[in-house]
């Protein structure tokens, strides 16, 4: 399937904006949805809309099979040992908050450390700030190098015997840096800490093997990988999930209920109170099928740096000196640039972004050397269109789907 054929599967692109064919470059915020995903959700609502795990009628059985089938598909997608270790959430934010509320507050004590990086999205920053305030734990940050990467030796020096939790992004939407998660996990475990990984920007573009990475928790959102909005996933190691308490209570997640007490279902359902996101889970399964039919190797980075797609050479041109822009952004974070309500990336917007000029952003190609064993690597940056009204920086996604949508 070539790029033109793939693009044809996105109905939203069959329109003109300002007299030109629609070009969509904001997939880092949310991706567009292909026909197979739209049709899967539509089919659920038209043919077997029903609640799950409750009714014994035909529609209920079909809906339950589809919902739990989606869980099994996600488990295979991540190479999780057991589908019970896949918790459906509203997205990465909900997944990370679940860990920060249920796990962190149970294990942290005054003087314990939570290690973060300055490149974290707000969703992987604010929950840990609140956990630290609630428990008396201390936040520590791994320093950034001038090029926006993290040196393994700096990471190893920051994580100590007092560190209980390490929370880090797999691929930064601030800098485009790909962190060596497998190496980070080994260091964290050697010091007795658990590692929580934000996979929102990595899961759509590279093969993620949670067993090989040896992460304790891994979170991602469906809407960034062609699935519907409102569906996400938390993967966790079984022994950690089993010791965690639910943070939402109600139907579906209970085992027994008495007037003054209740008990919870086993994994994964104890974390999925109320009617779950059935259509979203079904759409996520269809999105996984879609991405795998294209091949994640096609939407992921190549070692040469450019995606192996017909339009890549003609549609994109590397600009000399753009890496300096990434370094300037990194230096801003090194100086402790704070958060801004206009930016979801965990750093105040640089001046050229606030002024509505074209910001620097990750180029639409792959990560150099994605074996996950070396130091963090920085994606080259390219100029793109900023939003003059909001000043919002909208990173361009990488690989074939960028070329399809752009």
Image (cartoon, grey):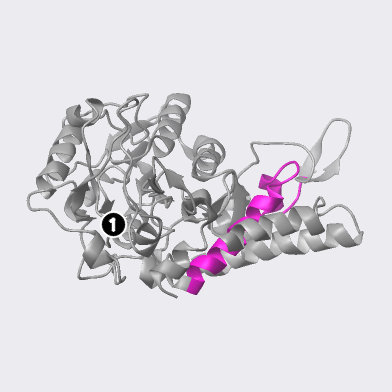
Q: Which residue is at 30% across, 71% downward?
A: 310
Taking the magenta stretch, the answer to whether it contains residue 269 is: yes
Please say whether residue 286 is visible from this viewpoint.
yes
Q: Quadrant of residue 162?
A: top left
Q: Residue furthest right?
A: 57
Dot 1: element: loop
Q: In the image, is residue 101 above or below residue 307?
A: above
Q: Please state, as top left, top right, bottom left or bottom right, where the C terminus lies in the image.
A: bottom left
Q: Position of residue 212 (x, y in %)?
A: 41, 69
Residue under label 1: 364
* Chief secondary structure of the magenta portion: helix
Q: Which residues are magenta?
A: 264-293
Q: Position of residue 303 (x, y in %)?
A: 23, 70
Question: Camera-side residue: 19 or 264?
Answer: 19
Q: Quadrant of residue 274?
A: top right
Question: How many circles with numbers are drawn on the protein?
Answer: 1
Q: Residue furthest front?
A: 19
Q: Which residue is at 28% across, 55% downward?
A: 179
Classed neighbour count for the residue bearing mark 1: other residues with Cα under 10 Å, few (<14), some (14–19), many (≥20): many
Question: Camera-side residue: 136 or 401?
Answer: 401
In this rendering, would 360 be left or right of 30? left
Q: Which residue is at 46% across, 50% downward?
A: 31
Q: Which residue is at 38% across, 36% downward?
A: 112
Q: Position of residue 354 (x, y in %)?
A: 24, 26
Q: In the image, is residue 27 above or below residue 374?
A: above
Q: Position of residue 272 (x, y in %)?
A: 69, 46
């Amino acid at each position: 399937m070539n790029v033109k054929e793939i693009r044809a599967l996105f109905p939203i692109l069959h329109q003109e904006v300002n007299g030109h064919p629609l070009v969509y470059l904001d997939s880092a915020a949310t991706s567009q949805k292909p026909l197979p995903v739209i049709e899967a959700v539509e089919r659920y609502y038209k043919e077997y809309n029903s609640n799950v795990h409750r009714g014994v009628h035909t529609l209920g059985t079909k809906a339950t099979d589809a919902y739990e089938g989606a869980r099994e598909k996600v488990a295979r997608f991540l190479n999780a040992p057991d589908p019970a270790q896949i918790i459906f959430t509203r997205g990465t934010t909900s997944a990370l908050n679940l860990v920060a509320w249920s796990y962190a507050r149970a294990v942290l004590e005054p003087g314990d450390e939570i290690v973060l990086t300055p490149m974290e999205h707000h969703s992987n920053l604010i929950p840990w700030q609140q956990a630290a305030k609630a428990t008396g734990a201390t936040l520590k940050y791994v320093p950034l190098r001038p090029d926006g990467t993290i040196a393994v030796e700096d990471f190893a020096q920051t994580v100590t015997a007092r560190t209980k939790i390490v929370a880090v992004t797999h691929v930064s939407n601030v800098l485009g840096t790909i962190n060596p998660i497998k190496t980070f996990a080994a260091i964290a475990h050697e010091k007795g800490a658990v590692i929580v990984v934000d996979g929102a920007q990595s899961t759509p573009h590279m093969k993620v093997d949670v067993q090989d990475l040896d992460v304790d928790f891994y979170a991602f959102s469906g809407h960034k990988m062609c699935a519907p909005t409102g569906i996400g996933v938390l993967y966790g190691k079984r022994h950690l999930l089993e010791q965690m308490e639910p943070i939402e209570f109600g139907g579906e997640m209970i085992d027994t209920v008495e007037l003054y007490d209740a008990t919870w279902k086993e994994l994964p359902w104890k974390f999925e109170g109320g009617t779950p996101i059935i259509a979203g889970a079904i759409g996520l399964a269809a999105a996984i099928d879609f991405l795998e039919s294209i091949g994640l190797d096609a939407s992921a980075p190549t070692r040469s740096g450019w995606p192996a797609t017909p339009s890549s050479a003609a549609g994109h041109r590397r600009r000399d000196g753009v890496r300096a822009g990434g370094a300037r952004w990194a230096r801003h974070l090194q100086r402790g640039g704070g958060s801004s309500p206009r930016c979801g990336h965990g750093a105040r917007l640089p001046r050229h972004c606030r002024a509505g000029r074209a910001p620097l952003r990750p180029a639409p190609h792959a990560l150099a050397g994605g074996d996950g064993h070396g130091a963090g690597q920085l994606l080259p940056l390219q100029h793109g269109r900023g939003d003059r009204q909001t000043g919002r920086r909208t990173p361009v996604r990488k690989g074939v789907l960028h070329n399809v949508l752009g």
